[in-house]
Image: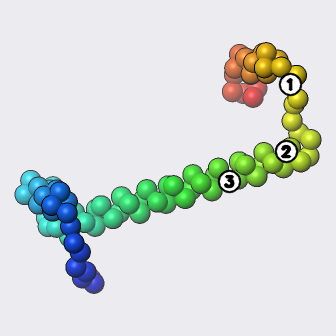
Amino acid sequence: MPTRNISLTGHYDSFIEDNVRTGRFGNASEVVRAGLALLERDQSEHAAKLAALRAAVAEGVADLDNGRYIDFDSSEALNTYLQGLVEAGPAHG
């Protein structure tokens, strides 16, 4: 396994030592690897959410381009429409 020297703040050094001392991890490398795994998972989840958001935006733009939208002449009309969707439930939205 490759080795790498890193600089830590006092806070993170203490955090690592506490996790090893309490037995949660066997050594400092295990703590750092666990932290990196969490960071990797977080970045992967963020990328997936961003991709889903981009797809939803693209779908919305395509709907607009193809005339699949409803014009409302007032905020009251919009609120009435939205309330109807809420009352109809998820199967009808």
Q: Quadrant of residue 15?
A: bottom left
Decide which of tag 3 and tag 2 comes sooner along the chain. 3
Q: At x 78% / y 45%, what residue is drawn?
A: 60
Residue annotated with mark 2: 63
Residue annotated with mark 1: 72
- Residue type beneath disc 3: Arg
- Quadrant (top left, top right, bottom left, bottom right) of the N terminus: bottom left
The correct choice, above or below, for 29 with respect to 43 in the image is below
Along the horizontal axis of the image, is 19 left or right of 89? left
Q: Position of residue 4 (x, y in %)?
A: 25, 80
Q: Residues within 10 Å of mark 3 (few under 14, many from 20)?
A: few
| Label 2 to label 1: alpha-carbon separation | 16 Å
Q: Position of residue 56 (x, y in %)?
A: 71, 48
Q: Is residue 63 visible?
A: yes
- Residue type beneath disc 2: Asp
Q: At x 88% / y 22%, what residue is drawn?
A: 73
- Quadrant (top left, top right, bottom left, bottom right) of the C terminus: top right
Along the horizontal axis of the image, is 52 left or right of 42? right
Q: At x 25% / y 66%, what residue is drawn?
A: 32
- Residue type beneath disc 1: Phe
